[in-house]
Amino acid sequence: MCYSNSSTSSNESLGQFYKRSAQLLPPETPLYYANGFSFPTWRIITKSSNIERMKWGLIPQWYHGNSPLDFAAKTLNARVETLHEKASFKLLTSSHRCVVPSTGFFEFKHLNSAKIPYFIYPKHHPIFSMAGLYDEWFNPETNEYLRCFTIITAAANPLMEEIHNIKKRMPLIIPNHEVEQFLSGSDDIRDFSPIPSEEMCAHTVAKGIILSPQPNTPAVQEAIVNNIEVQTRLF
């Protein structure tokens, strides 16, 4: 699943990449490491001519419960195979599609009892275009509308099968030349295939930084040699 993401592009470069206006955005704050369970605000691409801002963790417009954050924690991701079955997503699959720009994401590889973190990032382009859905929920406590999103996941490609080797999932990353087609809602989301392994790069990173109180630092993405994995391969 995709619960740890990054977005370090400038507003200007993001606008140029997606051919959207970034004029309404506040000054960017680089997100080198963002945990979905902290419900960060993200710059999001829709059919709008402007780049929008939404909270990660989808709360559907029909939600009337007393624990919206608990609900949002369960909708950080949405499996592409069951989008048309889940009440939170099935009414959004055509009309409320979005793209979640990412400069790379994090996953753990399991080796025996060890969990080895990887940073996975684009090979040929500066940005991953992760498929998503969004909705707008009215918060009765604040009398405000909250725009929020989920990231769609799919079965892993060979690279991600090796890294995310327990659940074998990955974000549904839309090729950049198909972004507008995806946003149009004209094709079934299940017909879009994740980008191939050849379009992705990955390296191990420091687990200590990820688990630190302040992981949002450039060092969290720096490559390291993981001795546990090296020793496993040798012996």
Image (spheres, helix red, strand yellow):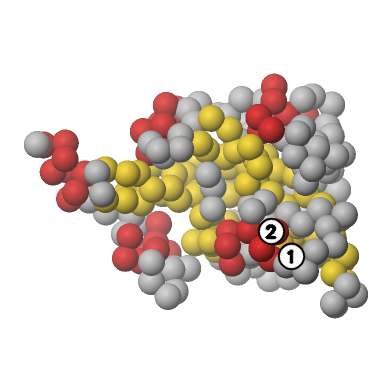
**Residue 205 image-quadrant placement:** bottom left
Inspect the image, locate mark 2, and give the three-letter code of the amino acid beneath it. Ala
In-front residue for pair 138/62:
62
Spatial separation of the CA atoms under disc 2 and disc 1: 6 Å
The location of residue 206, given as percent across then percent down, is: 31, 59
Residue density around tag 2, few if under 14, some if 14–19, many if 20 or more, within 10 Å? many
Q: Residue 89 or 219: which is nearer the viewer? A: 89
Give above or below for 38 relative to 159: below
Q: Is residue 190 left or right of residue 35?
A: right
- Circle 2 is placed at which residue position? 72
On the image, the x and y values in percent for residue 161 come to 41, 31
**5 sits to left or right of 205:** right
Horizontal arrangement in the rendering, residue 115 relative to residue 93 (left or right):
left
Residue carrying label 1:
68
Residue at x 87%, y 54% (from the top left corner): 62
Quadrant assignment, res 66: bottom right
Amino acid on which disc 1 is placed: Pro
Which secondary structure, mark 2?
Answer: helix
Residue pushed farthest top? Answer: 191
Q: Is residue 57 visible?
A: yes
Q: Residue at x 61, y 25 (%)?
A: 193
